[in-house]
Image: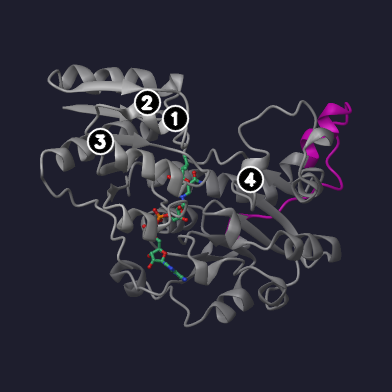
Amino acid sequence: MKIFAYGIREDEEPSLKKWEEANPNIEVGFTKYTLTADSARLAEGSDGVVTLQTSPYTREALEVLNKLGIKYISIRNVGFDNFNFKDLNDLGFTLTNVPVYSPNAIAEHTVLLMGRLLRRVPEFDEKFDNGDFTWAPTIGKEYREQTVGVIGTGHIGRVVIKILQGFGAKVVAYDVYHNDDIEKQGLYVDSLEELYKQSDIITLHVPLFDSNKYMINDKAISQMKDGVYIINCARGELIDTDALIKGLDSGKVAGAGLDVLDNENSVFGKVWSSVDNIPNEKIKNLAKRTNVIITPHSAFYTETAIHNMITTSFDSNKALIEGLKPNNIVDTTK
Ligand code: NAD
Ligand code: COI
């Protein structure tokens, strides 16, 4: 049996080596390149592939894998929004993801972004760089005075809620599916409008679908409190960047913490040396503001997460090749 992995980084190699040692009968090949029509042929002779990328998985790349007789794809991450399910189904692929490699990694990052905005850390940093060790005017706010609206109470949203409650924040939540524990605590509101109306901070933890692309748009922002903070550690396309920029310009939005951005692949993963060199005008606009914190889709990036991403994705791919049905097969019929 052979498994071929795409986009393997140096920080993943120790966990990959451990997996190989634990599975000596399985040949593992890998490349640092992501899965494209060109790199797909590197998987020749393999029974399954393991991948991780934020760029789209193209039909051309999948067609090459299909021609090589490969039927099993295991992604090392949660979100599968960069696949076209029709392509997967047409070409007969079975896909697995890693639904819970470490919700804490993303949840902690989310609450840190909130805290850095509330305590105006970027502005203090700027003052510090200028040798300014004074207090005013960078007065902060406390979590316990905030109502935080959590949209999506799945694996990550629920850990965010728990951490926030530890800080004494009031939480309201919205989800199309109600989790028993969150329901028992009475945190759900009936509509997004109600959540927007009540929240001082809004944080997104839903998957991206065609139906919720740009759900945070002009209309949604107009329904929010004046001076709202918006946090997005889910998917960039959930927010219409033009609407966010307008909200920031008018002061309606007091600040934003963004680990993901619409069109982030034009900027993330590369070194621009200065914000001025960022080649995407909208992202540059956001990046120049001290009330906007951008991180390069790094909320997931912890040692624990990386180890679990490697281990679970390779275990799943192996199980598929052995004819088993791991419980993390993605339902591509929906
Ligand atoms: P999950 O599937 O466990 O939870 C998602 C929740 O959203 C579910 O409870 C679901 O019922 C709810 N939901 C779906 N559509 C909704 C809608 N239209 N309105 C309201 N609720 C809706 O997912 P998760 O693991 O918690 O991941 C949440 C998000 O975080 C996803 O977008 C995922 O891709 C992203 N993510 C980001 C990073 C990162 O590094 N930034 C890492 C992992 C996951
Ligand atoms: C996910 O797991 O879905 C993420 O967003 C992490 C990223 C490395 C793709």
Q: Position of residue 219 (x, y in %)?
A: 69, 77
Identify the secondary structure beneath mark 2.
helix
Question: Which amino acid is tagged 3?
Answer: Gly
Q: Look at mark 3 in the image and give the residue it sits on.
A: 48
Q: How is the image coloured?
A: one colour
Q: Are marks 3 and 4 in contact (CB under 8 Å)?
A: no
Density class for disc 2 (Cα within 10 Å; few <14, some 14-19, many ≥20) is some
Question: Could you tell me which residue is drawn at 28 percent across and 50 percent down?
Answer: 93
Would residue 220 be found to the left or right of residue 253 on screen? left
Q: Are marks 3 and 1 in contact (CB under 8 Å)?
A: no
Q: Look at mark 4 in the image and give the residue it sits on.
A: 264
From the viewer's perspective, is residue 312 above or below residue 59? above
Number of numbered labels in the structure image: 4
Give the Cα distance between marks 3 and 4: 29 Å
Would residue 16 be found to the left or right of residue 135 on screen? left
Identify the secondary structure beneath mark 1.
helix
Question: Which amino acid is tagged 1?
Answer: Ser
- Observer-side mark, 3 or 1, equals 1
Which numbered disc covers residue 39? 1
Give the Cα distance between marks 3 and 2: 12 Å
Region of the chain picked out in magenta, as a range? 123-144
Q: Is residue 124 magenta?
A: yes
Q: Quadrant of ligand 1?
A: bottom left
Q: Is the residue indicated by label 3 positioned so its CB lies within 8 Å of ligand 2?
A: no
Give the Cα distance between marks 4 and 1: 22 Å
Q: Are marks 2 and 1 in contact (CB under 8 Å)?
A: yes
Q: Position of residue 35 (x, y in %)?
A: 44, 35
Question: Which amino acid is tagged 4?
Answer: Glu
State which tag comes first along the sequence, 4 or 1. Answer: 1
